[in-house]
Amino acid sequence: MAVEVKMMKYQAAIFDMDGTILNTIEDLTNALNYAMKETGHRHNYTNEDTKNFFGSGVEVALTRALAYEAGARLDSLVAVGTKDEVIPESVTKEEVERISQVYRPYYAAHAGIATKPFDGIVEMIQALKAKGIACAVVSNKPDEAVQSLVKTFFDGVFDFSLGQKASIKRKPAPDMNEECLRVLKVAREHCVYIGDSEIDVQTAQNSAMDEIAVTWGFRSADFLKTHGANEIVNDSNELFAAITK
């Protein structure tokens, strides 16, 4: 009697980095406060503050921090970096760039001090690979930081990793995911995108890919639901089950 073998829906999984596979928040906060202090700005931001700043790249994060310093409401910061942004007049591109010149090298040199993978993530990705599912990581973090962190915490685990470069549009544009599909040689209908923020939900939508949102990162389950997340998981076991269903 022939045994029917069920084919898995997904042949590849693309992961966001910050808040999805790596707990980077303490190092991000420390680097942000260092750069803000060195450039004469408020520099007592907490980890919870920082979670509201990051997700759309360094420049957007610094713009959000400056807007918050200037009196913008915390719940308004999600619009910064989008067509709906409203930024205080005191926040200029020139000042964001000045702070960025301090932040980037400092974070690159201190990105692995408190950072570590979330519980069960490394083992889960290895289990996915054992099932023949290709795995990649895509992040709005600078590419040099992404490659360094992947080497430190996921050496030999991912099939491809990509961070923000001047030559490719950052998330939520689909371009970075498109590059993953090209390298992995997987059709989009057989790929799932995993992240922890509204940017990740938008990225999956713009890429015409299925998406899974995780609750252990920078955004709450309620926030993710409000911003269009369809499937939400609470730990690495639930995530593995969702990818291999």
Image (cartoon, rainbow, N blue to C red):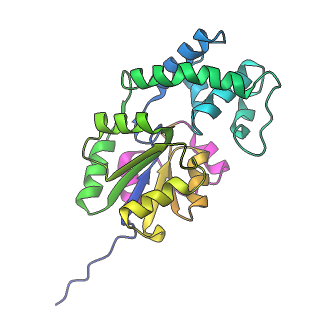
The number of callouts visible is 0
**Which residue is nearer to you in this view: 111 or 238?**
111
x%, y% of residue 117? 35, 35
Assign the C terminus to one quadrant of the image: bottom left
**Residue 232 in view in this figure:** no
User: Residue 87's image quarter?
Assistant: top right
Q: Is residue 217 left or right of residue 80?
A: left
**Which residue is nearer to you in this view: 191 or 237?**
191
**Residue 107 in view in this figure:** yes
Q: Going by the picture, which residue comes out furthest to the front?
A: 167
Picture residue at 38% right of the left edge, 52% below the top: 136
**Which residue is nearer to you in this view: 30 or 140?**
140
Picture residue at 62% right of the left edge, 44% below the top: 222
Assign the N terminus to one quadrant of the image: bottom left
x%, y% of residue 238? 39, 52
Picture residue at 57% right of the left edge, 57% below the top: 174
Q: Is residue 191 above or below residue 212?
A: below
**220 drawn magenta:** yes
**Which residue is nearer to you in this view: 76 or 237?**
76
x%, y% of residue 95? 69, 21
Picture residue at 60% right of the left edge, 17% below the top: 45
**239 drawn magenta:** yes
The stretch in magenta equals 218-245
